[in-house]
Amino acid sequence: MEPEEKKEMLRRIPAVDRLLNSQGIREILGIYPRNLVLTAINQVLDKIRRDIQRGNAPSDPSFLTPENLSTKVSERAKILEQPSLRPVINATGVVVHTNLGRSLLAERVLRKFPSIAGGYSNLEYDLAKGKRGSRYSHVEGILKEITSAEAAMVVNNNAAAVLISLETLAKGREVVVSRGQLVEIGGSFRIPEVMRKSGARMVEVGTTNKTHLRDYEDVIGPDTALLLKVHTSNFQVIGFTEEVDAADLVTLAEKYGIPVMEDLGSGCFVDFSKYGLNKEPTVQEALSKGVDLVTFSGDKLLGGPQAGIILGKKRLVEAIRNNQLSRALRIDKLTLLALEETLRIYRDEQAALKEIPTLNIICQPYGTVKKKARRLIRMVGKISTENFAIDLVDGSSKVGGGALPLMVIPTCLLSLKPRRLAAHEIEAALRSNQPPIIARVEKDNVLLDPRTVMDKELKIVANAITSLAEAGA
């Protein structure tokens, strides 16, 4: 397109006021708020101007008529009207998927939301005494009951729990930690960086693969405030390795009168090894070994909302609670509600395995998932398509969330093998479904794992696959 042609095309773009008075836009204004429609108009016109400048616009100026532009504005307004945070179907097989919201809350928890979210509550009010109370009281009792900890408090995530604990107990002093435990987890959360932010001075001991008890003792001095043990969570060193057990670390710390803190990362209350899965240290085990302070997440293996839970000796927890940072890091009433109700389920381990989605999904046997996969493929029905071939194949699911990285969970997958459509086209089409279906691509096949697809979502997935099979036919 020549420069003069571009100028002429730009002059033909209707003014916003003219568009607002057109029949098509008036109809759109009857559906969407005026400000949203104005935003849609401006975005559509801005794109047209860019396309013209780049030579990407149609040569026929009829596409600039108010009628044609109204259609584009309507499409844009529909997109703008959608909320940014939307439900998706997780067909990846990653149970605690950080990008997809981590743990699902139990139905028992969800039923509690309307009364608390839609009304006043005793968030910081002591009903018995008729005066101001503490928001932590709503979960401290149940946490102490389940774990036998002396005291408990909760902040907004585990990174915050580690930060405020170190800042309270070791600011300006030394914290001893094994080199093999200086991990980085999602979002570039690094133990050395958090320790620096807390004001504590890190003292590294041992090597990446081996740290002995004597390594800790050799560096303990008058400025040592804390011995820190970090669960490596999202990676494991195997082979020629050795680390110090928490009980031995506690014995050493008692000798010098300093506390031991353990960051469990994911944290869990259930011993998975009892159900044929990999062993993961439980919160109860850490406390039983005498660890003075334990921190962990609420929204990973615990299966609750995002939270950072701090358990341990009363004098230490109270000191952390009195830290001015606690107000900046505190959790709101809805998080407290979800956490308390989740914890109440843990009073009965079998009920927890059945009702808490994260535990239930992880512990689902292969046979159960295969039945679900067969049910899904029956829902899809017989399809005659050149777009892709469909089949059931064996594979593995993952726990996710930085937990149990070596644990392989056998599963049965629905495989869409590309024919006319490429794997990336199939994946993108599923992702653009309403609601979006998030699958994974391996070896040029699109895989859907029924383990993380809820029963109520199976029909939606089946319909999406059928529609995609018929596309372009």
Image: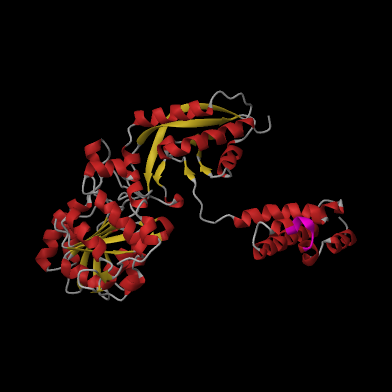
Q: Position of residue 427 (x, y in %)?
A: 56, 40
Question: In the rendering, at what x and y percent does residue 7 appear?
Answer: 86, 63
Q: Is residue 273 left or right of residue 163?
A: left
Residue segment shown in magenta:
21-26
| 6 in relation to 322, above or below | above
Q: Residue at x 26, y 49 (%)?
A: 345
Of 90 and 78, nearer the camera is: 78
- Residue 319: x and y in percent read 22, 73
Which residue lies most toward the left here? 255
Quarter in which the C terminus is drawn: top right
Position of 366 with respect to 245 (left or right) is right
Name the residue rendered at 35%, 47% in the picture: 107
Query: Residue at point 24% right, 67% down?
Result: 175
Magenta span: helix, strand or loop, mainly?
helix
Decide: is 58 above or below 37: above
Name the one closer to the observer, 122 or 67: 122
Answer with left or right where residue 199 lies relative to residue 76: left
- Is residue 283 in sight in this rendering? yes
Give residue 174's position: percent from left, percent from top. 24, 71
Q: How is the image coloured?
A: secondary structure
Residue 22 in the magenta stretch? The answer is yes
Is residue 190 shown to the viewer in this render? no
* Residue 466 found in image quarter: top right
Q: Residue at x 14, y 64 (%)?
A: 253
